Amino acid sequence: MLRVAAILLSFLALVLPAGTANSQTYPSKPVRIIVPFPAGGLADVLTRGLAQELSKAWGQQVISENRPGANTIIAAEATAKSPPDGYTMLMANDPTLSSNQYLYSKLPYDPVKDFAPVINIIAVPSVLVANASLPAGTLRELINLAKQKPGEITYGTFGPGSKTHIDTEGYSALAGIKLTHVPYKGIAEVVPALLAGQINIALAGVQPVLVHLRSGKLKAIAMATMKRSPVLPEVPTFSEAGIPNFESRSWFGLVVPVGTPRPTIDRIANDVRRIASNKEFQDKFVTGVGLEPFILMPDQYAEMLKADREIYAARVKNINVKLD
């Protein structure tokens, strides 16, 4: 009997994937999450909160490492070239894995082949906002005004090829209107320009404009989401306002280098889901700051990425922009 048991154990050691054994001891050393954005932004704050909770759960230090620049390319390349062992993760978003491949002739990473999806965590809903003096308070009024004055209505973005640029041109094409693009470096420049009347409208995340919407200095035209926001329940969606099936939302989720053992991926995904689903965590890092829970496990995340890439392939083709 002992001899049979020994043979069986030897056989199992040969046939069981190495990842199974690795996942049972993971993590056995510090883990890092690379963030493609500067400190202090939404992604950074979310990642630091998650890293703190994972450190408690795993008994290992989880480090949030900022590597901003080049439309998330620097961070993505660093992650793609890391060992596929679960000890380096990327807090990815839509430029990293969806739109960059259509905006650049050549990337130092392959968004499809170099990464394995782990878990998507949040969505950043977008709202179309306008300067309070614009003589249009609804999407239909805005479209009519734009048709009466082609090219006279200006919109601010985070730069050529940014999500706000791609998506604004997306709904403009659907509505059959012509707007004038005014690029800025980011939301920190777009909001003051809106408040000063230097531009008329902009797509923006809810959180950076919420205080100005509530004060009346800006007005919300439409939510670029499939359903109304609990933060702005009075604001209709694009679909309700006359442009069906238009959506503009960013998302943030964790990916690892391809080749990372699936049991390790599942371990990370399950632990992150437990943390991200906690009400206290959501109040502090998600719903409490105008974001939405958008938790997708590995296979669901992969399906979402496939659909997201198809959307951006069409939208980038529509604006005919290259960033290199």
Image: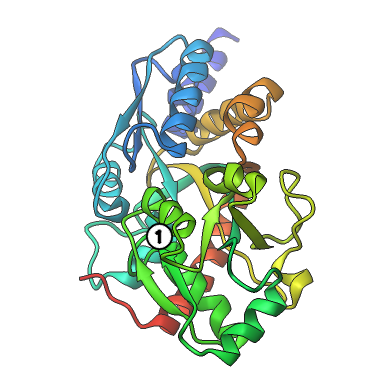
Q: Quadrant location of the C terminus?
A: bottom left
The quarter of the displayed image where residue 161 is located: bottom left
Q: Nearer the viewer, residue 73 or 260?
A: 73
Q: Quadrant location of the N terminus?
A: top right
Q: Nearer the viewer, residue 151 or 124?
A: 151
The image position of residue 282, as x and y in percent, is 65, 29
In the displayed structure, 77 sits above or below 246; it is above
In the displayed structure, 73 sits above or below 311; it is above
Q: Nearer the viewer, residue 55 or 139?
A: 139
User: Would you call the spot at circle 1 few (<14 residues within 10 Å), some (14-19), or many (20 or more)?
Assistant: some
The amino acid at mark 1 is: Val
Residue drawn at 44 percent across, 57 percent down:
196
Mark 1, residue position:
112
The image position of residue 146, as x and y in percent, is 57, 84
The image position of residue 276, as x and y in percent, is 62, 29
Residue drawn at 59 percent across, 41 percent down:
211
Residue drawn at 47 percent across, 83 percent down:
152
In the displayed structure, 74 sits above or below 59; it is below
Residue 303 in the figure: left or right of residue 258: right
Camera sees residue 261: no
Residue drawn at 38 percent across, 14 percent down:
61
Residue 28 in the figure: left or right of residue 279: left
Q: Nearer the viewer, residue 292 or 307?
A: 292
In the displayed structure, 84 sits above or below 181; it is above
